Amino acid sequence: MKRIPLPNETEDGWSYDPSSIEHVIEARLRRQEHSKRRRRETVQVEPSRSKKAALGLNEAEIAEIKWEAVRRFFDAAKLSDELRDRRAQFRQTFLERTKRFEKNGDAEIAEEARLQAVLFARVCERAIADATGYFADMLTQAVVAARGRKDFSLSFWAEMWAECLRFAMSLAEFGTASEWCGKAWGDASKEAPLPHIYRLDSMPKQRAESLKFTEAFKRDFQERLRHGSDMWLSEAERRITLRCLLSYAPGRGDTPKDKSKRVVMLLLIASPDLSARQVCAKLDQRNEQSPGSAPIPESWGKKGARSWIEAYDKFQNAVEVFISKIKNRAGIGSGSRP
């Protein structure tokens, strides 16, 4: 992705617009790059490509996945305990609230809009995160099936993140988010935020009072909701990672029956960029935590090796060939990969 100049950038942090897809992803990429620099690792980002072509899906396929996730978003519309208690309180104090609103309408409307905006932003933010995670999970399954592989480069991760954030931010648009809020709240008149509105003697007056509330609610609601973008991206990233771990790319053959080969393959699927020595070190760590969970090949044991690292040190070439063959079987290439 093309770098975006951000104000107040330092080595450890920068300012950015949380409602901008480009800024949120740029911030995430910079955090990752900075973390990797500290570990003295080099990050190579591939040139940007057409988003849909890069994912291996067409517009209709992505739209179908989005529609299913949107349906789930609205089906799951529900209130937090705090909002449910507030709705019950509205019913219990309906007459008292009606008198207050009739006496001092503007002040009551402004305060009610502010409180409702804060409470709804919290619960809607979480609902968008859940729907985005569901979308990310389905998208990853489709992408892995279309590409036949799941070893994602950093630039490909950025494309996946961008698609997930576009979906999340479409749910955060006021029209969609307010529809979710309305469905979750219900339409009982005694539980309405404006209890006095039905006592006004004309439709224009009712619309005017509703507009005051809507404008005040919208301003605060959107301002709070837009800061959920990092949470939405984190949930998408979590679900993409999990789906990659659980999925097997088609056309790669079954997982090897040999336990030594199987543990290497599963490790490389999760971390395709590990060197042969790093693979050996991680498998030895696994054996320390759970003895026998990552056995070395029997032929290496007969040659005197008692661990993966010892085998690597004694016959490095044979170990590298062994791991390379497993990479090829799993469809995991070397160097910069899409």
Image: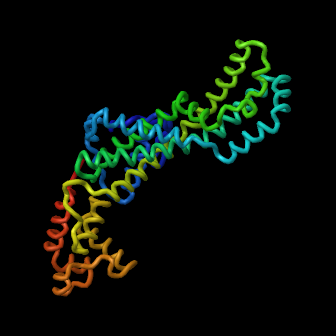
Instruction: Work out whether 161 lies above or below 322.
Output: above
Up-down: is 329 above or below 175? below
Q: For this view, does 19 lie left or right of residue 79?
A: left
Q: Position of residue 330 (x, y in %)?
A: 21, 60
User: In the visual, does 280 lie left or right of 191?
Assistant: left
- Which of the pair 12/132 is nearer the observer? 132
Residue 306, quarter of the rendered image:
bottom left
Q: Which residue occupies the foreground of this view, 18 or 326? A: 326
Total marks placed:
0
Residue 270 located left or right of residue 108: left
> Foreground: 331 or 42?
331
> Where on the picture, by quarter, is residue 69?
top left
331 relative to 180 in the view: left or right: left
Residue at 65% x, 29% y is: 217
Q: Residue at x 59, y 35 (%)?
A: 183
Specify the quadrant that holds the N terminus: top left
